[in-house]
Image (cartoon, rainbow, N blue to C red):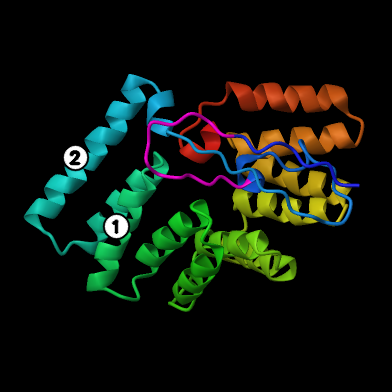
Amino acid sequence: NVTIAPRAVLETSSTDSVGISWKRAGLIGSAITLGSAIFIGLRPQLSFQSRISEAELSTFQAKISSLEETLQATPNDTAAQVSLANTHFEVGNYTEALAKANNALQQEPNYAKALLTKGKVQIATGEYEKALSTLTTSVEQSNPTAEIFNQRGDAYYEVGRYDEALADYRNALRAEPNNAQAYINWSAIDVLRGNFQDALQNLNLAVEKNPNSISAYTNRGSRKAELGDIIGAGKDWVKASRLAPQTANEYV
């Protein structure tokens, strides 16, 4: 039997439709029962800007203004285009993020960082097949980073190609052995396959590599609860709740 959780929809003042995977948001298994390795998506709409403090928002706005000034002076600065795209992405301005990434790609069609940002936006907005194409092009450039492998793994994950997703998460760890996100992602594959103890071990490593990861603590709490460690689960969830979210995904 598979119990499907209600889709969460948060009130938003943004025109962007923001998709947040329950895996990346740290909700694996908490709201569902897995009977046949069935993936249930949780894709709320979110206006992150309306839910962070004025000080935090002003920091993002100041960075955006500074980058826009840079681009006014040097319109062909692709690094600044990508940095601006990523800043918009962090606060959930996906339309702007995609536009800036595309601007950079018009100047450098194989610019790996711009392809990565574009792929991230495509995943966030549910265009998983497009994201796979974009991120594969990015991987094919020289020296792909752990983030590129993680993102492509997420795209594979979202379309149900779990073996390929796991291969990319392992590739991410080869590129960066201390990458906590790769361990979190790997744990999601473990959960889908019913290997909750293996998932817990991967999340222990994620917490070890990044003790400030909201997703690592939230997911580890879920795994502990499933294994009967209710006290340990509570401690992890309390820890997660006390960490300050820095991006839209972490807020969710």
Percent x, y of residue 235: 75, 22
| Residue for point 58% across, 44% down | 43
Q: Nearer the viewer, residue 109 or 160?
A: 160
Task: Identify the disc placed on residue 99.
Answer: 1
Whether the residues at callouts 2 and 1 have beta carbons within 8 Å, the answer is no
Q: Residue at x 62, y 34 (%)?
A: 8
In the picture of the structure, the residue carrying the numbered disc 2 is 65
Side (left or right) of 80 relative to 110 = left
What x and y, as percent, mark residue 176?
57, 60
The residue under label 1 is which amino acid type?
Ala
Asked whether 18 falls inside the magenta stretch, the response is yes
Circle number at residue 211:
none
* Left or right side of 164 for 234: right
- The answer to whether residue 74 is left or right of residue 116 is left
Mark 1 lies on a secondary structure that is helix
Relative to the observer, which residue lies in front, 96 or 61?
A: 96
Residue at 40% x, 61% y: name it: 118
Whichever of callouts 2 and 1 sits on the residue coming sooner in the sequence is: 2
| Residue 244 on image: x %, y % | 51, 26
Between residue 175 and residue 45, name the one nearer to us: 45
Image position of 101 with respect to 92: above or below = below
- Who is closer to the viewer here, 20 or 168? 20
Q: Amino acid at mark 2?
A: Ser
Q: Main secondary structure of the magenta part?
A: loop
